[in-house]
Each structure stands twice: as C-alpha cells, then as structure tokens.
Image (cartoon, rainbow, N blue to C red):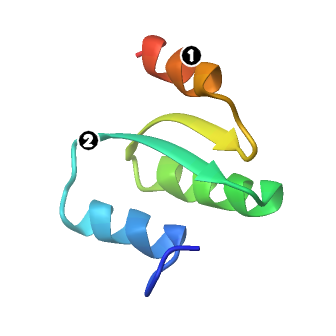
C-alpha cells in the first residue's frame, strides 16, 4: 500500500506533470493492475510493463531489457 495516494492518482499526477519517464506497474491485485494499465495507455504515458505480485527479479529484468 502506498501512503496518501493510489496508483491511479500517481499516474494522473505524472500525466499533469508531463512526465516522460518509463513506467513499470506493479500490483498484487490483477483486476486493479488491468485498470491502471488501461489508464496509463489512455493518458499516453510511457508504460513499458506491468507485473503482478508476486514476481521475481528476473521478471523485472525482462521488462527492463525489452526497452
């Protein structure tokens, strides 16, 4: 759990700040991950991957190597 804001709010904040960074989504809730992934795409953020917990270090490295 993130204090004071959720993933949707973080993405909206990144959008309003015109962030150009790469984003990897991570969540333990598959349904929520799908929702946040759709929002990131709608906001045209630079989404490079989405991982559902639990994941392994190899999963993170795979996402980062694809960029």
The C terminus is located in which quarter? top left
Mark 1 residue element: helix
Residue 40 vs 64, above or below: the answer is: below
Nearer to us of marks 2 and 1 is 1
| Label number found at residue 62 | 1
Tag 2's secondary structure?
A: loop
The crowding category of the residue bearing disc 1, from other C-alpha atoms within 10 Å (few below 14, some 14 to 19, many at least 20), is: few
Q: Residues within 10 Å of mark 2 (few under 14, many from 20)?
A: few
Residue 59 in percent (x, y) is at 63, 24
Residue 39 position by quadrant:
bottom right
- Which residue: 24% across, 68% down? 16
Query: Looking at the image, is 36 positioned above or below residue 67?
Result: below
Going 41% across and 63% down the picture, which residue do you hit?
11
Alpha-carbon distance for marks 2 and 1? 18 Å
Q: Quadrant of residue 62?
A: top right
Q: Residue furthest front?
A: 57
Taking 67 as reference, is 21 left or right?
left
> Relative to 57, does residue 53 appear above or below in the rendering?
below
23 or 42: nearer the viewer: 23
Horizontal arrangement in the rendering, residue 17 relative to residue 15 (left or right): left
Q: Residue at x 22, y 52 (%)?
A: 19
Lower position in the chain sequence, tag 2 or tag 1: 2
Residue 24 is left or right of residue 17, and the answer is right
Reading the image, the residue beneath label 2 is: 21
Residue 12 vertical position relative to residue 41 in the rendered view, above or below: below
Q: Could you tell me residue 64's position as x and y percent?
A: 45, 21
């Amino acid at each position: 759990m993130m204090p004071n804001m959720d993933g949707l709010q973080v993405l909206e904040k990144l959008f309003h700040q015109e962030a150009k960074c790469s984003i990897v989504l991570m969540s333990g809730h598959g349904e929520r991950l799908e929702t946040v992934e759709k929002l990131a795409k709608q906001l045209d953020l630079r989404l490079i991957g989405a991982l559902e917990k639990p994941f392994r270090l190899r999963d993170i490295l795979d996402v980062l190597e694809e960029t």
